[in-house]
């Protein structure tokens, strides 16, 4: 379950940001990840709940934004949304594409008090 190591890294960064800005408590963490990362939202939430206990984020909430894949066809130039399994261009049928969105994994915000 790579979600546990992802969340460990999120907490490391959030704790460092909290500490360096002089705060002691994290109240909310907002994350964005793309569907193409193969991250399970349920597993990420499980890891968050398991790792927050006893630390500065013990009562924090987690907000997650999931981005659908978006690609550009390199044959006709069309941009389109699709699922994880089908990248075929809806305009010309080509499978020669460039992924524009869907592999992101970022911390959007850490709220502290």
Image (cartoon, grey):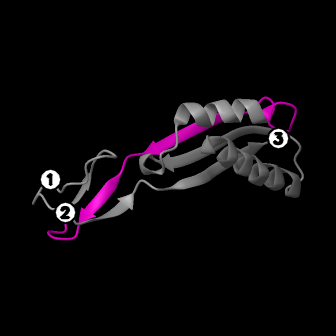
Labels 2 & 3 near each other (Cβ < 8 A): no
| Residue 18 covered by magenta stretch | no
Sooner in the amino-acid sequence: mark 1 or mark 3? 1
CB-based contact (under 8 Å), mark 1 and mark 2:
yes
Q: Is residue 96 left or right of residue 48?
A: left
Q: Which residue is mark 1?
A: 90
Of 77 and 87, the residue lying toward us: 87
The furthest residue to the left: 92
Q: Residues within 10 Å of mark 2 (few under 14, many from 20)?
A: some
Identify which residue is drawn at 19% across, 63% down: 78
Looking at marks 2 and 3 on the same chain, the residue that comes earlier in the sequence is marked by 2
User: The magenta stretch spans which residues?
Assistant: 52-78
Instruction: Indicate the quadrant where residue 20 lies.
Output: bottom right
Horizontally, residue 15 falls left or right of residue 32, namely right
Which-is-in-front pick, marks 1 and 2? 1
Q: Say which residue label 2 marks.
A: 78
Instruction: Identify whether 62 is placed above or below 89.
Output: above
> How far apart are labels 1 and 3 at the CA level?
48 Å
Q: Pick the residue in front: 87 or 18.
A: 87
Q: Secondary structure at mark 3?
A: loop
Mark 3 surroundings within 10 Å by alpha-carbon count, few (fewer than 14), some (14 through 19), many (20 or more): few
Residue where numbered disc 3 is placed: 113
- Is label 1 in a helix, a strand or a loop? loop
Which tag, 1 or 2, sits closer to the chain's start? Answer: 2
**Magenta stretch encompasses residue 73:** yes
Position of residue 57 measured from the top left corner of the image (x, y, whole percent): 80, 36
The percent position of residue 43, horizontal first and vertical second, equals 59, 33
């Amino acid at each position: 379950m790579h979600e546990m190591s992802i969340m460990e890294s999120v907490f490391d960064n959030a704790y460092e940001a909290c500490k360096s800005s002089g705060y002691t408590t994290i109240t909310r963490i907002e994350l964005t990840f793309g569907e193409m990362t193969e991250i399970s939202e349920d597993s990420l939430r499980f890891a968050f709940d398991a790792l927050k206990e006893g630390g500065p984020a013990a009562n924090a909430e987690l907000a997650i934004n999931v981005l659908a894949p978006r690609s550009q066809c390199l044959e006709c130039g069309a941009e389109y949304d699709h699922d994880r399994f089908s990248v075929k261009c809806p305009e010309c049928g080509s499978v020669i594409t460039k992924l524009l969105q869907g592999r992101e994994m970022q911390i959007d915000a850490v709220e502290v008090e």
